[in-house]
Amino acid sequence: MLEKYLPADVPAEKRKEFLNILEEVTNSTGRLMLFAGDQKVEHLNNDFYGEGIPADDHNPEHLFQIASNAKIGVFATQFGLISRYGVDYPDIPYLVKLNSKTNIIPYEAKDPYSEQWLSVNDVVEFKKYSGVNIKGVGYTVYLGSEHEHSMLKEAANIVHQAHKNGLLAVLWMYPKGKFIQDEHDKHLIAGAAGVAVCLGADFAKVKVPYENSQFKPELLHEVVQAAGKCGVLCEGGKKINEEEFLKELYEQIHIGGTRGNGTGRNIHQRPLKEAIKMANAIYAITCENKNTQEALKILNS
């Protein structure tokens, strides 16, 4: 079943490795539960310290404790965090985020550019000599930015180099900049998903489409069709009510047709035991074909 997602630029000697990774991280479903841990750069300390955020979340190790104890597909974070904590948590399935930027400069002031930090070859070498369990790489593209040409070039190269080494490639496809009027417009999001498949990505993490500020799973149909063989992952967004989050996630997958999710704050902004249960509930819907009520039982167990 998963062979239909095998890109042609994966060399023959790497195809088994690629398919084994895809099978492992998706629990043989083709759907990915991505635990997003890249916000310490993207949002600075805003997501980790403040009202309603438990003390557990102040320590970067909280992310690794969750990822090592919960059911997840991959844990996506920056190379430096992995190099600091991977020695203690080598078995977590990692996805190395190859670029990131802070949110200090507002998009209204300057179009965003998030330049690549490290090469795929750096990651491959690190994987070999460290023994850390790296499954893929990730990269953010800000479509609509005056710098999109540079990010598109970097993204295309990253995807190709990842596949040549038998690794997955996930692209964060976020239209941003002074020319973007509504980043939650379904037509725009569909366009971003279409660019992701043109870049060869295995999965694209996108914004959730809204209509009159409301989510409707049918809005994802255009997005999923535009993405083709590239799996669509909706971002988790800010922390909301658990039942509301899980219900929307179920609808995204089973009505909207997405192939997973990329969730950060709705997991890690909780004490450790609660964060693990929330991750397990999300995984159950994403990769174990559980419904919302079954996921809530996991959460409340």
Image: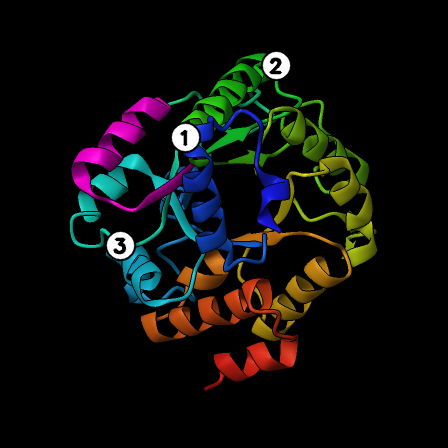
Q: Is residue 13 left or right of residue 68?
A: right
Give the residue pinned by disc 2. 146
Q: What is the CA distance from the residue labelled 3 to the residue labelled 1?
A: 24 Å
Nearest to viewer (mark 2 / mark 1): 1
Give the residue pinned by disc 3. 91
Q: Residue at x 41, y 30 (%)?
A: 13
- The x, y position of residue 57, in whole percent, is 32, 60
Q: What is the CA distance from the residue labelled 2 to the residue labelled 1?
A: 39 Å
Magenta span of residues? 117-137
User: Which quarter of the rendering shows the C terminus?
Assistant: bottom left
Q: What is the CA distance from the residue labelled 3 to the residue labelled 2?
A: 39 Å
The image shows residue 280, relative to residue 178, as above or below, that is below
Q: In the figure, residue 148 lies in which quadrant? A: top right
N-terminal-most mark, 2 or 1? 1
Q: Secondary structure at mark 2?
A: loop
User: Dots 3 and 2: beta carbons under 8 Å?
Assistant: no
- The x, y position of residue 99, in whole percent, is 41, 29
Instruction: Please indicate, yes or no, whether residue 178 appears anywhere in the rendered image.
Output: yes
The kind of residue on which mark 1 rests is Glu
Nearest to viewer (mark 3 / mark 2): 3
The image shows residue 156, relative to residue 24, as above or below, that is above
N-terminal-most mark, 3 or 1? 1
